[in-house]
Image (tube, rainbow, N blue to C red):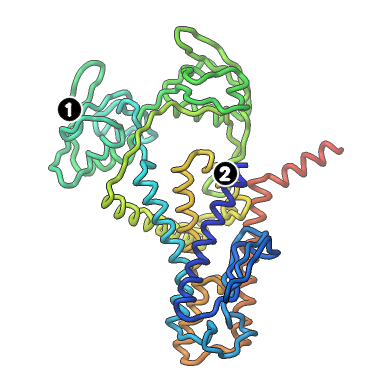
């Protein structure tokens, strides 16, 4: 149910704001809109307005605004047709769809910030272990050190305290007071050391269970919220990260957990579920999951009106830079095409974010809208808005309109490219995310 509702909301909203952008700007520029449709035919329902037919289609992976004269074969030269308008007008109409997605992404992020979506970790501000231990050694920090204050500001949250280290408005060195085994000590950090520490430091996460997922291995074994796991297979566990790593690498083998429940010590045996997880390299690995969440307490960080307006703009800009980076790495072969996701991949992730709550779903909705706006501006796929703008610019340079035959050829090339990409993404969905090949192989083995 979460997957269905999440998919409908994410795709429905992203497509609606995109097509609404085209619709509004087309109408404002005197272009007659014949149909406004969310989804693709066959149609679920429709009604005819004074000029425009409004429809909802059964196939929820897109939508369209059908403008008069937009089809190369239907161009008659009437003044209310799309191709009768000037090149700048056509470019404005093409840009309006992606712009609608960027605006939607911006307001989703803004609402996320204003309503406390950003949360600070509120365990006691204590340093936990990190892979690059030499950074701690360089700064004179040990795992378990508690932060008293940074630059004279009392420590309330871990990340909030660490951020104070890099305040450029303050003087150097940055002074941080720590509590270690009952003793107070001060460390002085210059700018390079402070920035390295701020980028690497992690809080100490106690291996205590805050929530047990219904039906998971932990629930079946009798683990309860509040239990503290202090050993696995006889090996002591002091941090949540140790617990995660051990369970993830278990390979589905039986684990013996040492559990502290109040004043009582228990031994719990369980077998983790084995799930597939795709790495950045495109490789699929099997990881263990037992169905628990950590007891890290967080508090919301509410942004003020002006801070939120500016921070939301920066975050949407960061999304776009991220998409540029991913695209470049795909094109240059540094990322495999197996990472491309189609409707099934989006549906799975939509459901997961919806389960996590309103704020996480808002951020995913913002990410999808920013991604849709970005992809539609790319000129590679010649039926996207960016592809159309590219053709209009060519037309402007040539000083004459493109022939109907040329437009038809560009459309055919564009659709061929899009269908190729869709086939690749659908293959990834079926074979990697749904493990269809592996399931079919197991079914044949059972038949044998």
Q: What is the residue that sits farthest to the top in this orientation?
A: 263
The image quadrant where one finds the N terminus is top right
> Camera-side residue: 140 or 422?
422
> Camera-side residue: 235 or 98?
98
Q: Quadrant of residue 325?
A: bottom left
Q: What is the residue that sits farthest to the right in this orientation?
A: 448
For mark 2, what is the residue?
Answer: 351
Element on which disc 1 rests: strand
**Picture disc at residue 123:** none
> Camera-side residue: 388 or 351?
351
Marks 2 and 1: CB-CB under 8 Å? no
Residue sitting at x 28%, y 37%:
160
Is 150 placed left or right of 271 in the picture? left
Element on which disc 2 rests: helix
Q: Classify 10 Å Cα crowding around label 2: few (below 14), some (14-19), many (20 and above).
A: many
Q: What is the residue that sits farthest to the front in this orientation?
A: 50
Q: Nearer the viewer, mark 2 or mark 1?
A: 2
For mark 1, what is the residue?
Answer: 186
Residue sitting at x 44%, y 88%:
397
């Amino acid at each position: 149910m979460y997957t269905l509702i999440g998919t409908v909301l994410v795709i429905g909203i992203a497509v609606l704001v995109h097509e609404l952008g085209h619709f509004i700007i087309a109408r404002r520029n005197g272009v007659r809109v014949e149909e406004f449709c969310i989804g693709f035919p066959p149609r679920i329902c429709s009604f005819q307005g004074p000029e425009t037919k409004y429809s909802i289609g059964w196939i929820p992976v897109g939508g369209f605004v059908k403008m008069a004269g937009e089809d190369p074969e239907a161009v008659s030269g009437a003044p209310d047709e799309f191709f009768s308008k000037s090149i700048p007008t056509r470019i404005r109409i093409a840009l309006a769809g992606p712009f609608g997605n960027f605006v939607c992404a911006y307001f989703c992020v803004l609402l996320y910030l204003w309503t406390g979506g950003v949360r600070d970790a509120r365990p006691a501000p204590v340093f936990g272990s990190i892979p690059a231990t030499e950074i701690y050694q360089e700064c004179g920090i040990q795992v378990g050190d508690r932060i008293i204050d940074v630059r004279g500001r009392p420590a309330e949250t871990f990340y909030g305290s660490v951020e104070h280290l890099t305040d450029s408005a303050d003087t150097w060195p940055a002074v941080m007071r720590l509590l270690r085994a009952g003793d107070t000590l001060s460390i002085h950090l210059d700018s390079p050391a402070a920035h390295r520490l701020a980028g690497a430091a992690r809080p100490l996460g106690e291996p205590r269970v805050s929530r047990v997922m219904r039906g998971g291995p932990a629930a079946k074994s009798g683990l309860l919220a509040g239990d503290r796991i202090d050993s696995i297979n006889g090996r002591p566990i002091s941090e949540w990260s140790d617990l995660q790593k051990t369970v993830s690498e278990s390979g589905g083998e039986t684990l013996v957990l040492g559990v502290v429940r109040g004043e009582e010590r228990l031994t719990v045996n369980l077998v983790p579920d084995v799930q597939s997880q795709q790495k950045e390299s495109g490789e699929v690995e099997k990881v263990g999951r037992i169905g628990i969440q950590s007891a890290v307490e967080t508090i919301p960080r509410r942004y003020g009106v002006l801070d939120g307006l500016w921070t939301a703009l920066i975050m949407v800009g960061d999304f776009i830079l991220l998409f540029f980076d991913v695209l470049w790495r795909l094109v240059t072969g540094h990322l495999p095409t197996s990472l491309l996701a189609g409707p099934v991949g989006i549906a799975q992730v939509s459901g997961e974010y919806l389960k996590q709550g309103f704020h996480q779903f808002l951020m995913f909705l913002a990410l999808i809208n920013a991604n849709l706006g970005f992809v539609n501006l790319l000129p590679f796929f010649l039926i996207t808005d960016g592809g159309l703008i590219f053709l209009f610019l060519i037309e402007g340079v040539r000083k004459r309109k493109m022939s109907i035959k040329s437009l038809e050829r560009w459309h055919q090339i564009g659709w061929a490219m899009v269908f190729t990409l869709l086939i690749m993404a659908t293959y990834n969905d079926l074979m990697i995310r749904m493990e269809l090949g592996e399931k079919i192989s197991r079914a044949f083995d059972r038949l044998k």
